[in-house]
Image: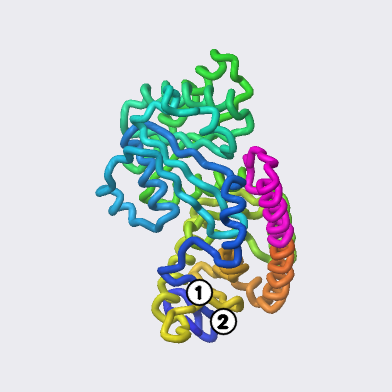
Amino acid sequence: MSFEDDDFVGSGSYSVVGSFPKEFGYGGEEHEEFRDQVEEAKPKILLMGLRRSGKSSILKVVFHKMSPNETLFLESTNKVVKDDISNSSFVQFAIWDFPGQIDFFGPDFNSDQIFTGCGSLVFVIDAQDDYMEALTKLHQTVTRAYKANPSIKFEVFIHKVDGLTDDHKIETQRDIHQRATNELEDAGLENLQLSFYLTSIYDHSVFEAFSKVVQKLIIQLPTLENLLNILIQHSGIEKAFLFDVVSKIYIATDSAPVDMQSYELCCDMIDVVIDISSIYGMKEDGEQNPYDTESASVIRLNNLTVCYLREVNRYLALVCILREDNFGKHGLIDYNFHCFREAIQDVFDLRQQNRENQARALQNGDRHRPDAIA
């Protein structure tokens, strides 16, 4: 199926779109038989913070495709919400959304059990509110969690920064970083590392931040980054992202620094592919089934830059940015991509074998802490 737009695509350009309908969601029947067996082997991401800090909004926007404006009507969370994220072999984890008003250090909760098996703890701070109380809760939370499970990755989302000026954002991040770090040093926890991100659901910053969170839980990340480096080195590509299509989280990129504008451009391209495919996708037996392993999309920008998307598998897509003169060799690029996809499949096969071994170990009663996406 061809798609051309005078504003983006030049005459005679190669462009195929046929993927990712609006209804495309999480799940995968090919892994269904192992899902129950390895449920306990999935790492947990704990989402914590004070009431009305925006935790549930982040969860809905990033993983459930909710419009940011719709989050204004979300009710305050009053119980622990466990959300299973299982859309690809690399992005499989459970997110636990904790209400801000619950004291999970009280006698009604076993805090050690909560933090066991936790891969990452994301603490959300409302940057538009007085954050002194939030800093106190942050210190209490991370110190208790660190004692229960020292391997947890601690992430701090300085959230709702869309209402702040650029100078105010920098000053707020510097102040929160300094206060939180000083409190940890005073408690003798200099080795406890916190990562800070400025986030908002009204732009791509929250997706970029969650990308960093998820990448720390993927033990195959160095392999994926090396494969992307080899691909761009031999294909004349300037920047490449390996995207989880549904959430628009990139699970890996090459070693070059991430330019936020390039990331946003790639996210917008995925949205275009989804929108076009939902309208013009192929139908089989009356049902829309636009997915095709050979599907691709090319968008030519007016600055002599080309955005190129290829599907890696049902859940992942490779999105590249390169100059138009380098795309003249797109036959070579396609060949290199096929080699890249085969290498990714080898990683998937090894991953699936590890998951089966985990399932057998769990069935045999060999309990362990799944702190990373193995």
- Please give left or right for residue 139 compared with residue 102 in the image: right
How is this picture coloured?
rainbow
Q: Quadrant of residue 345?
A: bottom right
Mark 1: amino acid: Ser
Q: Earlier in the sequence, mark 1 or mark 2?
A: 2
Q: Is residue 21 above or below residue 103?
A: below
Query: Residue 207: where, in percent of width, then height?
Result: 47, 50
- The extreme front residue here reads 364
Considering the whole magenta stretch, tell me its main secondary structure.
helix
Tell me if label 1 and label 2 are in contact, CB under 8 Å: no
* Residue under label 2: 14
The residue sitting at 53% across, 76% down in the picture is: 291
Number of residues whose C-alpha sits closer than 10 Å to that of mark 2, classed few (under 14), some (14–19) or many (20 or more): some
Figure check: 177 above or below 225: above
Q: Is residue 91 left or right of residue 232?
A: left
Residue 194: quarter of image: top right
Q: Secondary structure at mark 1?
A: loop
Residue 367 is a magenta residue: yes
Residue hosting label 1? 19
